[in-house]
Image: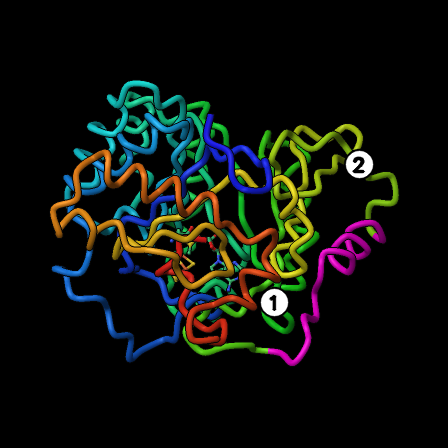
């Protein structure tokens, strides 16, 4: 079992396989002028498999594939197939925007993917275009249909943004009436390539819950699964559930079980740090597996106690402004 210096279990890796994306979500990256990382700076699939295999040997049980948009990277299905064959890895989950995903779902199911997070901030085609700068809502909805059809567990992620999708909160909650999905509302974080969009967080988890409770006064708190980052709720009689993720308020750090690796191989032991080491550079410098494992253990022993400490200790005291596409969410 892998433990950090605060006694927290680390069993979950979020691996961002690319910084590229086919959408331009307002809260994640600017609409144009993005400087993609040169391909040579991104980890190869061989490097990703090596680091995943080492981490699985050390205690990682679950890997989430994210990005950027994972399905824009060439040969991603071959990589997922190879990853699914790693001994000891119990679960592979994926976070996707759903634009290219629908036709791949039967194959994903065959590989053994049982749970997918689908990002969908609105059910309105015009608002989708305004938020993502691309007219792709029909493809995202097709992905939702295919996921349900293939009995894959679905979590729908919606970032809550003042002036952009507040009118979508209730329609998204209403999806839980007939669909067995978990709709999760996420506080907006300043990881958008620019910095804060608002001087204060206008839609925190409390305001989001109050808005839902006004319409659904009978909504009930339900048990949060272990290591959940969401506060979970259910409306009596509904098939699905509602989650609220206090991503900016950071109320879940005490049980944080996750680490992240960016497409460039930067290891982040907290969402709010700006990297503690680069595993790709170490591999390319010729480190052995034992060297790498020792370095990784060292990093786990220096984890910040929470996102506020990690933010304070950012190298160079750099502000929080990097794009979420380079972090993976
Ligand atoms: N492209 C995929 C997608 O959109 O699902 C995977 C990568 S995306 C960076 C992962 C998650 O991060 C998405 O659910 C997205 O909504 C969320 N996200 C991106 N930028 C965010 C921000 N500034 N604040 C909160 N969540 C954000
Ligand atoms: Fe792309 Fe996902 Fe970022 Fe949207 S949130 S721009 S889909 S990486």
Position of 119 with respect to 39 (left or right) is right
- As measured in the structure, the alpha-carbon distance from the residue carrying label 1 to the one carrying label 2 is 24 Å
Position in image of residue 31 (x %, y %): 36, 75
10 Å neighbourhood of mark 2: few (<14), some, or many (≥20)? some
Residue located 63% across and 73% down the image: 163
Q: Nearer the viewer, residue 30 or 260?
A: 260
Q: Nearer the viewer, residue 73 or 86?
A: 86
**Disc ID at residue 221:** 2
The answer to whether the residue bearing label 2 lies less than 8 angstroms from the nearest atom of ligand 1 is no
Residue located 38% across and 63% down the image: 135
Mark 1 or 2, closer to the camera? 2
Q: Nearer the viewer, residue 75 or 284?
A: 284
Residue 169 part of the magenta segment: no
Position in image of residue 253 (x %, y %): 62, 48
Q: Quadrant of ligand 2?
A: bottom left
Position in image of residue 9 (x %, y %): 54, 32
Magenta part of the chain: 198-214
Q: Earlier in the sequence, mark 1 or mark 2?
A: 1
Residue located 62% across and 39% down the image: 255
- Of all residues shown, which one is farthest toward the right? 217
How many discs mark residues in the rendered view? Answer: 2
The answer to whether the residue bearing label 1 lies less than 8 angstroms from the nearest atom of ligand 1 is no
**Disc ID at residue 161:** 1
């Amino acid at each position: 079992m892998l433990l950090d210096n605060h006694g927290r279990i680390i069993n979950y890796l979020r691996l961002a396989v690319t910084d590229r994306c086919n959408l331009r979500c307002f809260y994640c990256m600017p609409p144009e002028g993005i400087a993609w990382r040169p391909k040579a700076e991104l980890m190869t699939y061989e490097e990703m498999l090596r680091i995943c295999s080492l981490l699985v040997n050390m205690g990682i049980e679950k890997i989430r594939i994210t990005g950027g948009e994972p399905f824009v990277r060439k040969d991603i299905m071959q990589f997922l197939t190879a990853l699914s064959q790693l001994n000891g890895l119990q679960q592979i989950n994926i976070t996707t925007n759903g634009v290219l995903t629908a036709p791949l779902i039967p194959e994903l199911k065959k590989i053994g993917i049982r749970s997918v997070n689908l990002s969908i901030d609105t059910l309105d085609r015009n608002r989708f275009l305004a938020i993502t700068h691309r007219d792709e809502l029909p493809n995202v909805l097709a992905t939702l249909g295919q996921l349900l059809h293939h009995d894959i567990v679905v979590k729908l992620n919606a970032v809550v943004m003042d002036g952009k999708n507040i009118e979508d909160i209730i329609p998204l909650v209403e999806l839980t009436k007939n669909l067995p999905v978990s709709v999760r509302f996420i506080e907006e974080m300043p990881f958008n390539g620019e910095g804060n969009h608002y001087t204060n967080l206008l839609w925190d988890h409390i305001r989001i819950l109050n808005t839902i409770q006004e319409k659904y006064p009978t909504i009930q708190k339900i048990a949060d699964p272990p290591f959940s980052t969401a506060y979970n709720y259910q409306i009596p009689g509904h098939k699905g559930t509602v989650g609220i993720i206090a991503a900016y308020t950071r109320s879940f750090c005490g049980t944080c079980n996750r680490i992240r690796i960016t497409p460039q191989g930067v290891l982040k032991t907290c969402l709010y740090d700006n990297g503690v080491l680069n595993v790709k550079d170490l591999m390319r410098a010729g480190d052995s597996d034992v060297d790498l494992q020792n370095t990784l253990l060292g990093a786990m022993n220096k984890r910040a106690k929470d996102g506020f400490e990690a933010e304070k200790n950012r190298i160079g005291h750099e502000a929080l402004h990097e794009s979420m596409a380079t972090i993976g969410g």
